């Protein structure tokens, strides 16, 4: 097994928010960092520049994770650069807010494909090398709503609930190969995903959280980092929810 700081981490959806914070957390110890994005090219480059300040080798890659052929092309590029992930963080996702009665087939398919199918395909493609190496870390970024469900977020809750089940089942499958699989299921985090809520709505949510505030992206990143450490090898199949006491 390579020393931890010489390992390579792939973070999907890393051009902003939690994904960007995760990328910078790993870069802070000099690891090789792969920043995946779909369309936000300049934002991904900004994150890359921040990571490179720590002396990390950084690569940005674009792919639509709903399509396996695009993930395979991404893998081909990584292979050429000799940046084969030892750690995969499935962070890419989209949310949807609205009554289930108003959800179209297209909305359902998009939320499921981006949040759940993308994690499945990306994991399937990159876990093969981990199995050969008898070592690896897979961390899925889920949501508190995947545990408890949320009114008016039924589709999103369903996708994240599926991710949690995927995590638990795959952990059992890959444990004999020295690979851990865990999920981090944050509560409310201060990111652009919250821009759909006005100040009054945000204040109402904060009042329900015992610590009285939203999480910061770097607080979620620290937990992801911890789960990727070699000494976290006995932690697998867990859904850990940093939520400020909102759900216990």
Image (cartoon, grey):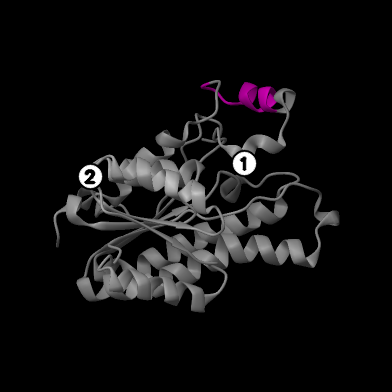
The residues tagged by marks 1 and 2 sit, at their Cα atoms, a distance apart of 30 Å
Residue lying farthest to the right in this orientation: 101
**Mark toward the viewer: 1 or 2:** 2
Q: Is residue 110 above or below residue 58?
A: below
Tell me where residue 246 sits by quadrant.
top right
Which residue bears the numbered disc 1?
193
Q: Are marks 1 and 2 in contact (CB under 8 Å)?
A: no
In the rendered image, the vertical position of residue 50 relative to residue 198, given as above or below: below
Whether the magenta-drawn stretch holds residue 30 is answered as no
User: Which image quadrant is residue 103 in?
Assistant: bottom right
Label 1 vs 2, first from the N-terminus: 2
Classed neighbour count for the residue bearing mark 2: other residues with Cα under 10 Å, few (<14), some (14–19), many (≥20): some
Q: Quadrant of residue 82?
A: bottom left
Residue 131, position as x, y percentages in the image: 27, 73
Horizontal and vertical percent position of residue 111: 66, 60
Residue drawn at the location 74% of the way across and 44% of the way down: 151
- Give the camera-side residue of 34 and 103: 34
Dominant SS type (magenta): helix
Q: Position of residue 213 (x, y in %)?
A: 55, 23
Task: Please indicate, yes or no, whether residue 240 appears anywhere in the rendered image.
Answer: no
Callout 2: SS: loop
Q: Secondary structure at mark 1?
A: helix
Query: Of all residues shown, which one is farthest toward the bottom?
Result: 69
Residue closer to the observer: 29 or 131: 29
Q: Which residues are magenta?
A: 202-211
In the rendered structure, find residue 55 and report the number of the disc placed on it.
2
Quick check: 31 left or right of 140? left
Task: Work out whether residue 174 or residue 1 is closer to the camera in this orientation and state it.
Answer: 1
At horizontal 50% and vertical 79% (from top left) the residue drawn is: 69
Q: Is residue 224 left or right of residue 158?
A: left
Q: Residue 214 got which mark?
A: none
Residue 187 appears in view: yes
């Amino acid at each position: 097994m390579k020393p931890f700081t010489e390992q390579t981490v792939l973070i999907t959806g890393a051009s902003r928010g939690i994904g960007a914070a995760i990328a910078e957390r790993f870069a802070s110890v000099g690891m090789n960092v792969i920043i995946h994005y779909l369309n936000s090219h300049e934002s991904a480059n900004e994150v890359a520049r921040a990571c490179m300040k720590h002396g990390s080798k950084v690569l940005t890659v674009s792919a639509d994770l709903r399509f396996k052929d695009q993930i395979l092309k991404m893998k081909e590029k990584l292979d050429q650069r000799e940046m084969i992930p030892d750690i995969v963080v499935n962070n890419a996702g989209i949310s949807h807010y609205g009554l289930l009665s108003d959800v179209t087939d297209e909305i359902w398919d998009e939320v499921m494909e981006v949040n759940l199918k993308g994690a499945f395909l990306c994991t399937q493609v990159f876990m093969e090398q981990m199995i050969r190496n008898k070592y690896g870390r897979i961390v899925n970024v889920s949501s508190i709503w995947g545990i408890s469900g949320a009114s008016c977020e039924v589709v999103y809750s369903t996708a994240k609930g599926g991710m949690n089940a995927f995590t638990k089942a795959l952990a059992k499958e890959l444990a004999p190969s020295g690979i851990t699989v865990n999920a981090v299921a944050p509560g409310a985090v201060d990111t652009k995903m919250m821009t759909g809520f006005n100040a009054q709505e945000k204040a109402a949510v904060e009042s329900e959280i015992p610590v009285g505030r939203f999480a910061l992206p770097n607080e979620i990143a620290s937990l992801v980092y911890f789960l990727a450490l070699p000494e976290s090898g006995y932690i697998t199949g867990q859904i850990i929810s940093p939520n400020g006491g909102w759900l216990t």
